[in-house]
């Protein structure tokens, strides 16, 4: 197992928790700002934007942006 694989296994739970916290924080904002909020629609929209951000990050990684981070 590489050092990176060992580290990701240690951090896996924390990374997932942080992602869910960001999602839940944005859900709260939607509920505060939109009295008649449709939670399922909001959840999907937030998840879509988060996926866009992940896709952009993956593209940046592929381009080598973080090769010398």
Image (cartoon, grey):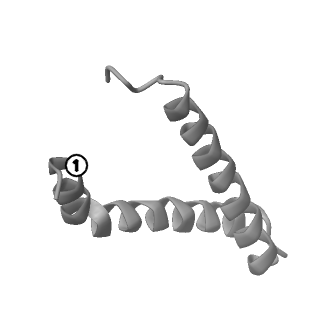
Q: Left or right of 53: which side holds 69?
A: left
Considering the numbered disc 1 on the image, is that residue within a helix, a strand or a loop? Answer: helix
- The residue at 76%/79% (across/down) is 40
In which quadrant of the rendered view does residue 31 lie? bottom right
Front-lying residue, 34 or 60: 60
- The residue at 26%/57% (across/down) is 8
Front-lying residue, 29 or 44: 44
In which quadrant of the rendered view does residue 10 lie? bottom left
Q: Position of residue 24 (x, y in %)?
A: 54, 68
Which residue position holds label 1? 4
Q: Position of residue 55 (x, y in %)?
A: 63, 46
- The residue at 84%/76% (across/down) is 36
36 w.r.t. 10: above or below:
below
Q: Left or right of 53: which side holds 42?
A: right
Q: Left or right of 46: which side holds 5?
A: left
Q: Position of residue 7 (x, y in %)?
A: 19, 54
The quarter of the rendered structure image containing the N terminus is: bottom left
């Amino acid at each position: 197992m590489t050092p990176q694989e060992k580290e990701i296994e240690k951090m896996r739970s924390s990374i997932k928790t942080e992602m869910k916290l960001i999602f839940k924080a944005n859900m709260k904002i939607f509920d505060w700002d939109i009295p008649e909020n449709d939670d399922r629609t909001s959840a999907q929209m937030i998840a879509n934007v988060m996926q866009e951000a992940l896709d952009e990050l993956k593209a940046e990684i592929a381009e080598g942006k973080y090769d010398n981070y």
